[in-house]
Amino acid sequence: MNEHPADRRLWTWVVVLGLTGQLAWTVENMYLNVFVYDTITDSPMALATLVAASALAATVATLLAGAASDRSGRRRELIAGGYVLWGACTAAFGLVSVDAAAALLPMVDAVTVAIAIIILLDCLMSVLGAAANDAAFNAWVTDSTHPGNRGRVEGVLATMPLLAMLLVFGALDPLTRGGHWVLFFSVVGGATAVVGVVAWFGLRETRTPRPSGSYLSSVVHGLRPSTVRAQPRLYLALSAWAILGTSTQVFLPYLIIYVQRYLDIEGYAIVLASVLLGAALVSILGGRVLDRVGPPRAILPVAGAYVVGLLLMFPARDMLAVIGAGIVTMSGFMLGVAAISATVRNLTPPDRAGQVQGLRMIFAVLVPMVVGPFLGAAVIAGADETFTELGVVKQVPSPWIFPTAALVVLLIVIPARMLRTMDSRPATLEPSA
């Protein structure tokens, strides 16, 4: 059977916008930490503060932009313009250095100034990216899909962060290892901006119902207790997302540093590429299974696979062992995200798609990125593992971050079981009378 042109357009923009957005987020979520670690400071608390501040900025931006896009119905402009500015801000990271900070404010400690500049720039980048990608693009995906294909779409979207990492590792990692950070950030930022320009001319606007009430009421609507009581299944799914996300943020911000510095694997790019390709393949194939069995029923089994992978990561030391454990871990994680995200989309009212993206950011980004990195940093500080580079002793992540992450994700049993036992009711975010 020939695919309908509308379906081809959907998949084209899902892949192009989804992958490009994740390229920018890969830089922000993982390589920015490496940049700070290599050029500014090795403090895990500084890295955790960077992650938490950007998560807060992104959440507020998504709440405001999501509600605005619901009311205006103009998601295309927010996506396209946001990607252009997002790319420009990403490119600006390469201009920050301790030397530049010392020249800017010579009377203040240069490292402190550099950290402050990076945090502020990261918050601005997160605001732009969240408005364009997390609010507008994700709402556009909800508008453009239906329960019959959301498992497949989420399976593909779940692979985008890992495919983005693979592209960055494979094509651009030599730049970071050579210290060419300006070129590294410029390439990713430029690609993001170009896709924004293309989207301005090629992306088609969706037609969805508009919410009633004022803009302010739309922003705070999903935070009201009455709204939670009216749609408990949606908030149970979001709670499951918060638990899974918190677990991954215990180790993910420190993962590249762990593989490079603790395991001392020279071919770490090969390890990461193998894990990403294997897990992406499992996620794409698993998306079809999600549509068949129903996303809520799949949450616990895939979370179980994720726990097994984390426990296997703890003793893994050589390349093959890390690759095997990593594929299990990331496959479980991606399928877990796909199952939970599809559940959330299926429970999203047609006129509140943008608003629900703001709720998603609170549960899937803000809570995990505030709690997880600091928990990981505490574990790393407690283990007190170090290595010496050019006569300087630096703290290095410990393998204990993996069993800690496994303990956190066990809490997902509570919302997942409650979600499966609740009766199916029509989705609504309108509070009961």
Image (cartoon, rainbow, N blue to C red):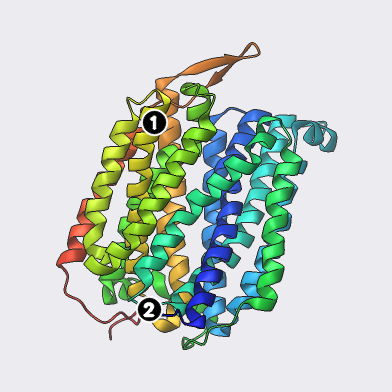
Q: Are marks 1 and 2 in contact (CB under 8 Å)?
A: no
Depth check: 236 or 102 in front?
A: 236
Please state the horizontal and vertical placement of residue 201, each as a whole percent of the image. Answer: 69, 77
Please give the count of numbered marks on the rendered protein: 2
- Tag 1: amino acid: Val
Please state the horizontal and vertical placement of residue 18, each as a whole percent of the image. Answer: 54, 62
Please state the horizontal and vertical placement of residue 225, each as a whole percent of the image. Answer: 33, 71
In the rendered image, the vertical position of residue 173 relative to residue 128, given as above or below: above
Secondary structure of the residue carrying numbered label 2: loop
User: Within 10 angstroms of label 2, few (less than 14), some, or many (20 or more) residues?
Assistant: some
Looking at the rendered image, the quarter that the N terminus falls into is bottom left
Answer left or right for 360 relative to 130. Answer: left
- Picture quadrant where residue 293 is located: bottom left
In the rendered image, the vertical position of residue 172 relative to residue 214, given as above or below: above
Looking at the rendered image, the quarter that the C terminus falls into is bottom left
Secondary structure of the residue carrying numbered label 1: helix
- Tag 2: amino acid: His
Answer left or right for 400 relative to 179. Answer: left
Residue 422 seen by the camera: yes
- Picture quadrant where residue 329 is located: top left
Q: Residue at x 50, y 21 (%)?
A: 264
Residue 241 seen by the camera: no
Q: Residue furthest right?
A: 103
In the rendered image, the vertical position of residue 359 relative to residue 274, given as above or below: below
User: Within 10 angstroms of label 1, few (less than 14), some, or many (20 or more) residues?
Assistant: many
Q: Which residue is mark 1?
A: 322
Q: Residue at x 64, y 35 (%)?
A: 36
Please state the horizontal and vertical placement of residue 308, each as a whole percent of the image. Answer: 26, 39
Q: Which residue is mark 2?
A: 146
